[in-house]
Amino acid sequence: MSTQGRLTQRLTQGHLVRRLAQLYLGLALYGVSSALLVEAGLGLEPWNVLHQGLAELTGLTIGVVSIIIGAAVLLLWIPLRQRPGLGTVSNVFVVGIALDGALALLPEAHSLAVRIPLLVAGILLNGAATGLYIAARFGPGPRDGLMTGLHQRTGRSIRLMRTAVEVAVVVTGFALGGTVGVGTLLYAVSIGPLAQLFLRVFAVPPASDGSTVVATGQPRRAILRP
């Protein structure tokens, strides 16, 4: 192999390593951010309202419920003809494991003086984590794929599909005992702008030889939810 070929190979491998590190760091931090929102107790992001409600019902941890629901949603990709990537499958497990791990380490928060900063930190970290893992371009999260699949199959807008799915998720989760509050509303209005900001911050440039190392998603069109 020529010197130029070896250099290109090393650059390509380094590019892949960066993307993999960014993917798993982003997914782990997403789980930590969700744990901060749980401890704040002022309202969760839509899917975790459902996860928490099911955890209350079943006695399982919220992380385990997240993994089970993620796997079930991924099965719905089959009739919707969606193709998962490495990031899609990793999302199912890493977020739930990190969520339970962070909850085991975080002390309980009782006063608003602690809970409000936890809420703000959780939302900001969630936006950063979302930008990290989506910008790595290893495929969308299972819940994102569900919404884009419904969009493609029904012809309805992604915005409508997302709204319909997440309203149903929040209502069901709340009925089961999940936490809905000011944090849920604040998350809904801020996560889009935050994620778009961090997508630009953590954007991974193309490989130097222009090749595609692993099948990639379309980060700027993503729905911005694991």
Image (spheres, helix red, strand yellow):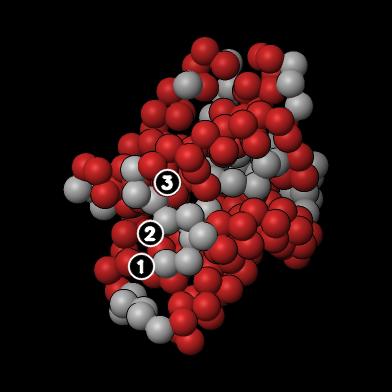
Q: Is residue 150 visible?
A: yes
The residue wearing badge 3 is 174
Q: Residue 142, percent across and down?
A: 52, 35
Name the foreground residue: 64 vs 7: 64
Q: Amino acid under label 2?
A: Leu
The residue wearing badge 2 is 99
Marks 1,3: beta carbons within 8 A: no
99 with respect to 136 (left or right): left
Report the residue that reaches farthest toward the left: 59
100 with respect to 43 (left or right): left
Q: Which label's residue is closer to the chain start, 2 or 3?
A: 2
Name the foreground residue: 207 vs 153: 153
Q: Residues within 10 Å of mark 3 (few under 14, many from 20)?
A: some
Q: Residue 174, percent across and down?
A: 42, 46
Q: Amino acid under label 3?
A: Phe
Q: Residues within 10 Å of mark 1 (few under 14, many from 20)?
A: many
Q: Regarding mark 3 in the picture, which secondary structure is present there? A: helix
79 with respect to 10 (left or right): left
How far apart are the two marked residues, 1 and 3, measured between alpha carbons?
23 Å
Q: Residues within 10 Å of mark 2 (few under 14, many from 20)?
A: many
How far apart are the two marked residues, 1 and 2, measured between alpha carbons?
5 Å
Marks 1,2: beta carbons within 8 A: yes
**Residue at 52% of width from left, 71% of height from top?**
119
**Residue at 64% of width from left, 54% of height from top?**
188
The residue wearing badge 1 is 102
Q: Residue 179, percent across and down?
A: 42, 56
Q: Regarding mark 1 in the picture, which secondary structure is present there? A: helix
Marks 2,3: beta carbons within 8 A: no
Residue 87: image tag: none
Q: Regarding mark 2 in the picture, which secondary structure is present there? A: helix
